Image: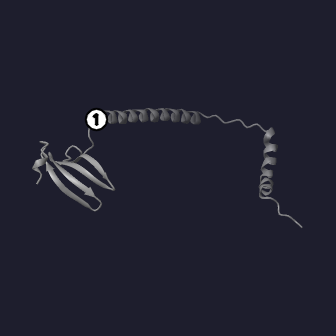
Amino acid sequence: MMRRPHRAAALFALCLPGWVVAAADADRIIYPASSAAATAGAQGLAGGNALTVVAFLLLAGAGAWVLWRGRNKPAPGRETQRLTVAESCSLGSRQYLVVASYDGKKFLLGVCPGRIDLLAPLDGTGDVNKLP
């Protein structure tokens, strides 16, 4: 029974002629041709690479300075935010008491799944007998 050659053996056989040619050329020495244009082109590339690195460093430094300078400022659009959640307390099973503040006024809200109720407006005096 005849067996098929393994794929690796087939690839090795395909690469073998290249090795034979490379072995025949091993005795021949190839010297690179030098020309003034090739040398000038290489020096021009090195100068261009240095300029690119300097430009990158300057841009990175400017970006870091902008981030550092604006680190304590609020995000755009947050300065005029009038609605905030001042405090929240969980009552269990997805039910919460929330103190919400809007334009300087505070409200006590009851929040449960599918429903939000205004429980009482808070005036800041701490008197709980004034509930509506």
The residue at the point 20 percent across, 58 percent down is 117
**Residue 20, percent across and down?**
82, 48
What x and y, as percent, mark residue 28? Answer: 78, 39
User: Within the image, what quadrant is residue 61 found in?
Assistant: top left
Considering only vertical position in the picture, is 47 above or below 25? above
Q: Is the residue marked by circle 1 packed among few (<14), some (14-19), or many (20+) residues within 10 Å?
A: few
Left or right, residue 17 beside residue 38: right
Could you tell me how many numbered marks the image carries? Answer: 1
Report the front residue among 19 and 46: 19
Q: Is residue 2 above or below residue 121?
A: below
Work out which residue is located at the far right of the displayed protein and give it.
1
- The residue closer to the viewer here, 30 or 94, is 94
Quarter of the C terminus within the rendering? bottom left
Name of the residue lying farthest toward the front? 129
101 lies above or below 68: below
Examine the image and state in which quarter residue 72 appears. Answer: top left
Q: Nearer the viewer, residue 85 or 46?
A: 85
Chosen colour scheme = one colour
Callout 1 secondary element: loop
Residue 34 at x, y percent in the picture: 64, 34
Question: In this rendering, would 33 be left or right of 80?
Answer: right
Residue 54 lies, in percent from the top left, at 44, 32
Give 30 or 60, whichever is nearer the viewer: 60
Q: Which residue is mark 1?
A: 72
Q: Residue at x 37, y 34 (%)?
A: 64
Q: Quadrant of the N terminus?
A: bottom right
Q: Is residue 1 left or right of residue 51?
A: right
Q: Amino acid at mark 1?
A: Asn
Q: To which quarter of the image does residue 58 belong?
A: top left
